[in-house]
Image (tube, grey):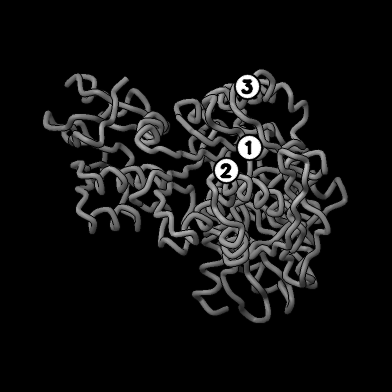
Amino acid sequence: MYQIDFQHPVHVFFCGIGGISMSGLAEILKSRGFTVSGSDRAESSITDKLSQGGVRVLIGQRSENITPDIDLVVFTSAIHPDNPEYIRTSELNIPSLTRAELLGQIMKNYSMPVAVSGTHGKTTTTSMISEILLDADTDPTLSIGGNLPSIGGNVRVGGSGYFVAEACEYTNSFLSFYPRISIILNIDADHLDFFKDLNDIRNSFRKFAQLTPADGALIINADIPDLQEITEGLSCKVITYGRDPSCDYWAEDIRFDGGAHPDFLLCRRLEDGTVLRRHVRLGVTGEHNVFNSLAAAAAADLLEIPAAHVDSALERFTGTDRRFQLKGKIGGITILDDYAHHPTEIAATLRSAKATGHKRVVCVFQPHTYSRTKSLFDEFAHALSAADLCILADIYAARETDTLGVSSRMLADRINETGGSALYLPSFEEIENYIRKNCQEDDLLITMGAGNVYEIGDHLLSSGS
């Protein structure tokens, strides 16, 4: 495998440079003296930012974009062997890496790389750790799967040995990483277009845990079923967190204010058995984020960050874009947006929404991929039934073309069958018109999904009605 060497910068071409992760890696290499160029299918705010930073971005993916002066080509998982740039790279015998392989190679150049994995909560927990390191003036390098307002994007290039990155399990990407500190937040059935079943997913997380070196540490949620299957026989230190006081970190006396922001006692058991307790208040909402913050605090302790910086950062951090994000108010209706696209995430987000005390919670949900909708159909129906009204948009196909015989209309019918209240409206225009006519003062409207459903809230706010 090609090895990135920061001491010898070369010309790297990114095929799919407009992706949030690819663009971040491109920025990191550019800051280290590499010549960086790339292509994408369409212009975006991300490609514009890269161009303004001196990166040559080509719109449209064509074979002529790959020239002999390129030393390395990086591909996203969305690029297939029939892509013209992929074919030309092979013809010219130019070395190539996947996005995950490049991220792993970059990790090797830092003395303290932290990788945050889990089916849910990666972006939020990565952001929490990032804010803690920034509060402590450690000058970290950060690669986040969402835009973090305090750094004005999803990447920050620092000058220290600290490197924090998300570790996604899809296509086993995280098995290309080299973390010193690994975090596993949870393990659920997801990405079943790639994994066979939950056992297959658990096997991959076990392999990820085994990547942690003997002088490193794995931070893991003790509430994961059959935890010993993941941790047994590991050479590294294992640190647990969860609901039970038998963990190394746990929370007591969890309370919520009127905005669903938790405060609690963060409890830590030292090696001599002594228990330390301190009061922590979060700037993000929901009980699920209490446990994300425990993982972040455990990482901070391993990195020897003083508790004062941890507590300050956790209270100041109000979330990344598309994570229970307040978009605005119109006609007495509060509009939020959230990236939740798995039943577990939906349930957690709707619990937080209910805790805000609004008269009704109206959820506009856009299912993400046919395979996920089909494999978790009943789980989706159950989770979405928690909304006072769920409006279903058409399924966002993403990388898929086969509908697998499932639709949003079918999901709406199932929600109604289980005692919930759901309505299927195929177009964004129909959804917006329905909201204008039927949403009432003191309703909480939350757009939800991993596709482009956020555009509904943005359009309602921009149109002023």
Residue 311: x and y in percent read 62, 61
Image quarter hosting the N terminus? top left
Q: Nearer the viewer, mark 2 or mark 3?
A: 2
Q: Is residue 374 visible?
A: no
Q: Quadrant of residue 82?
A: top left
Look at label 1 and name its amino acid: Ile
Image quarter hosting the C terminus? bottom right
Look at label 2 and name its amino acid: Leu
Determine whether the residue tagged by mark 2 lies in a helix, strand or loop.
helix
Find the distance from the CA under tag 2 to the CA under tag 3: 18 Å
Look at label 3 and name its amino acid: Leu
Determine whether the residue tagged by mark 3 lies in a helix, strand or loop.
loop
Residue 454 placement, left or right of 11: right
Residue drawn at x 52%, y 61% is: 455
Residue 362 placement, left or right of 179: right
Q: Is residue 172 visible?
A: yes
Instruction: Give the crowd class for mark 3: few <14, some 14-19, many >=20 residues within 10 Å.
Output: some
Q: Residue furthest right?
A: 419
Residue 386 placement, left or right of 219: right
Q: Quadrant of residue 265?
A: bottom right
Q: Disc 1 designates what residue?
A: 219
Q: Quadrant of residue 223?
A: top right
> Which is nearer the eye, 428 or 348?
348
Determine whether the residue tagged by mark 1 lies in a helix, strand or loop.
strand
Circle nearer the N terminus (2, 1): 1
Q: Disc 3 designates what residue?
A: 234
Residue 423 is marked as none
Q: Are marks 2 and 1 in contact (CB under 8 Å)?
A: yes
* Residue 437, placed above or below residue 249: below
Residue drawn at x 47%, y 42% is: 165
Q: Disc 2 designates what residue?
A: 302
